[in-house]
Image (cartoon, helix red, strand yellow):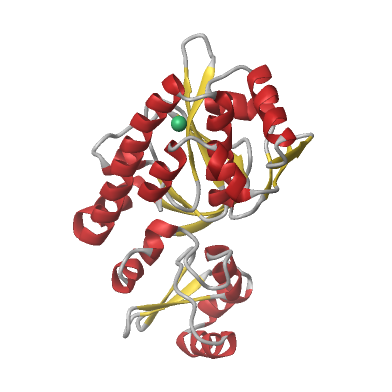
Amino acid sequence: MSETQSAGRVAGERVAGERVANGRILRLVKSGPELRALESGQVDAVLDRSTGTAYLLPDARRAMSAAGGQIANSLLAALPREDYQSLLGELEPVTLTAGEVLYESGERIRYVYFPGDAQVSLVIVMPDRKALEIGLVGREGMVGIALALGAEASPVRALVQGSGSALRMKAASFREALGRCLALQHELHRYAYAKLVQARQTAVCNRFHQVEARLAGWLLMTRDRVRSDQFHLTHQFVAASLGIRRVGVTNAAGALQRRKLISCRRGNIRILDRNGLKKAACGCYEIVRNLTG
Ligand SMILES: [Zn+2]
């Protein structure tokens, strides 16, 4: 591999026209073993060393992005193109499955994750095994932010809540990338600060605001994250997220249904009147939304 390097799990940006990209890949891959690896699907992308460009194969390209060629994760999408490209060799497309634990609280973080359409809950587990969800990370964020702030382990469990795509990076590569890429540092510090402000706002919200208004805001936040007015959530999960009893969720959801703002059947939630739901939500929703954009 002198001029080219075939790289399993290398990812790259979409190039104009699949046929053009595939032709270029075939020109770059000359040797037998590389070609066989390519044909057997072991290779996700081919790196052209002369230009530093990674050409993604169609399957990998689809895994990279659920949104037709755009970078699915907002933190990565916000980086200047050359910074993003400098990270590509370290980013591995993965599919996360609901119920999967990415890391346990107290455990050393081995990978950070940039979700695409996957949803990951951050959960605090008490000594008596009771668990409280303290955050949900989707395409707007990163799982493993503790590493960006200098910690080795996370105080929370990262549990996949909604199956979907993500890009992951080894902890050591991430630290190295953070050291050389100021734009990545800036994005992650901004994100961590937004999370800090959100946590403060949640403390105020839990103390002072009515369950119905909190539920309205929480449903809107979920809607923004999944980018759909319909989603599936059990009352038990909502109760754990809001730190209240299940009956409290049932009553509040009933009240929002009577106001014809949502419909809710067996955990299938549909937002019927988004503006009405915004009016029903406490001001915390807008404050957090403006921060996390
Ligand atoms: Zn509130």
Taking the view exactly as shown, the residue that stands out farthest to the right is 265
Question: Percent from the top left, x then y, of residue 199?
Answer: 37, 32
At a point 49% along the width and 89% down the height, the residue shown is: 24
Question: Percent from the top left, x then y, of residue 33?
Answer: 53, 76
Q: Quadrant of ligand 1?
A: top left
Relative to 232, is 180 on the left or the right?
A: left
Q: Is residue 97 visible?
A: yes
At a point 25% along the width and 61% down the height, the residue shown is: 183
Residue nearer the viewer, 217 or 141: 217
Residue nearer the viewer, 286 or 260: 260
On screen, residue 88 above or below 46: above
At a point 54% along the width and 42% down the height, the residue shown is: 279
Q: Quadrant of residue 78?
A: bottom left
Question: Percent from the top left, x then y, of residue 160?
Answer: 57, 39
On screen, residue 284 above or below 179: above
Q: Quadrant of residue 283?
A: top left
At a point 54% along the width and 31% down the height, the residue shown is: 213
Q: Is residue 181 visible?
A: no
